[in-house]
């Protein structure tokens, strides 16, 4: 058995034992009243009307910025090509001057690209934070109406997969999408 598997089992086994102990100490009537659901927040964001609009707006923003960066990159390639082709026409001082200007343009481009990436990360974080609050509110409404005691984030392949298996009957993602759309029509 590999070491990570052993360590994971050592960490998970006490948790499972504690959960079983807690469940076994719950009176029979209370255990039957306990209702649990799962949700995929990423699906809510991608499939809800407001979520799709927000994601489309983000994609458009990325596309616009990417076009600007591509234009700058093309300009740099053309400048480099021109410099190589006409290098023999310049004196040493002019060559150094042109190379210095070119390096400066490259640095400016790299700085713009880095700023764009930071700006994009900030916008993505802001979007996720804003929509997770809205998704949580819609989830709470659905859970309360449906009598759920606990709703767990399923996670996904892109994030941390929290739920390994669940019956489709406890997945309330579609209900949350409908509630989300009802509360967030714009």
Image (spheres, grey):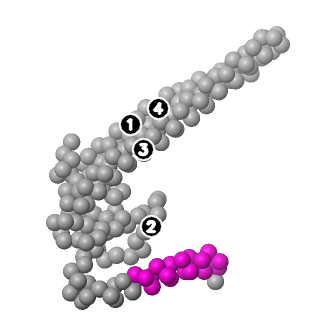
For image coordinates 44% across by 37% down, the residue present is 62
Please tell me whether mark 1 or mark 2 is closer to you in this view.
2
Q: Quadrant of residue 79?
A: top right
Labels 2 and 3: the sequence-earlier one: 3
Labels 3 and 4: the sequence-earlier one: 4
For image coordinates 34% across by 75% down, the residue present is 166
Labels 1 and 2: the sequence-earlier one: 1
Residue stretch in magenta? 2-19
Please tell me whether mark 4 or mark 2 is closer to you in this view.
2
Q: Which residue is identified by label 2?
A: 161
Residue nearest the viewer, comparing 121 with 98? 121
Residue nearest the viewer, comparing 108 with 8? 8
Q: Which residue is identified by label 4?
A: 65
Q: How far is the residue under mark 3 from the one under mark 4?
A: 14 Å
Q: Quadrant of the N terminus?
A: bottom right
**Left of 71 or right of it: where is 58?**
left
Query: For the residue carrying disc 2, how many other residues have a C-alpha within 10 Å: few (<14), some (14-19), or many (20+)?
Result: few
Q: Which residue is identified by label 1?
A: 60
Image coords of residue 171 (percent x, y):
28, 70
For image coordinates 47% across by 36% down, the residue present is 119
Q: Is residue 111 visible?
A: yes
Label 4 with label 2: CB-CB less than 8 Å: no
Image coords of residue 9 (percent x, y):
55, 80
Image coords of residue 78 (percent x, y):
63, 23
In the depicted structure, whether residue 161 falls above or below residue 82: below
Q: How far is the residue under mark 1 from the one under mark 2?
A: 29 Å
Q: How far is the residue under mark 2 from the one under mark 3?
A: 21 Å
Please tell me whether mark 3 or mark 4 is closer to you in this view.
3
Numbered disc 4: secondary structure: helix
């Amino acid at each position: 058995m590999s070491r990570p598997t052993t360590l994971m089992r050592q960490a998970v086994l006490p948790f499972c034992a504690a959960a079983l102990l807690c469940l076994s100490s719950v009176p029979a009537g209370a255990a039957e009243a306990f209702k649990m659901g799962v949700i995929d927040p990423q699906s809510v964001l991608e499939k809800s009307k407001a979520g799709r609009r927000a994601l489309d707006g983000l994609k458009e923003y990325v596309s616009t910025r990417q076009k600007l960066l591509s234009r700058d990159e093309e300009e740099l390639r053309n400048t480099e090509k021109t410099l190589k082709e006409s290098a023999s026409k310049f004196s040493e001082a002019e060559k150094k001057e042109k190379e210095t200007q070119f390096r400066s343009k490259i640095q400016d481009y790299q700085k713009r690209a880095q700023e764009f990436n930071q700006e994009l990360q900030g916008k993505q974080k802001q979007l996720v934070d804003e929509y997770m609050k809205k998704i949580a509110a819609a989830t709470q409404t659905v859970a309360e109406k449906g009598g759920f005691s606990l709703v767990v984030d399923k996670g996904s392949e892109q994030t941390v997969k929290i739920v390994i298996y669940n019956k489709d009957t406890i997945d309330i993602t579609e209900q949350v999408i409908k509630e989300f759309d009802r509360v967030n029509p714009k």
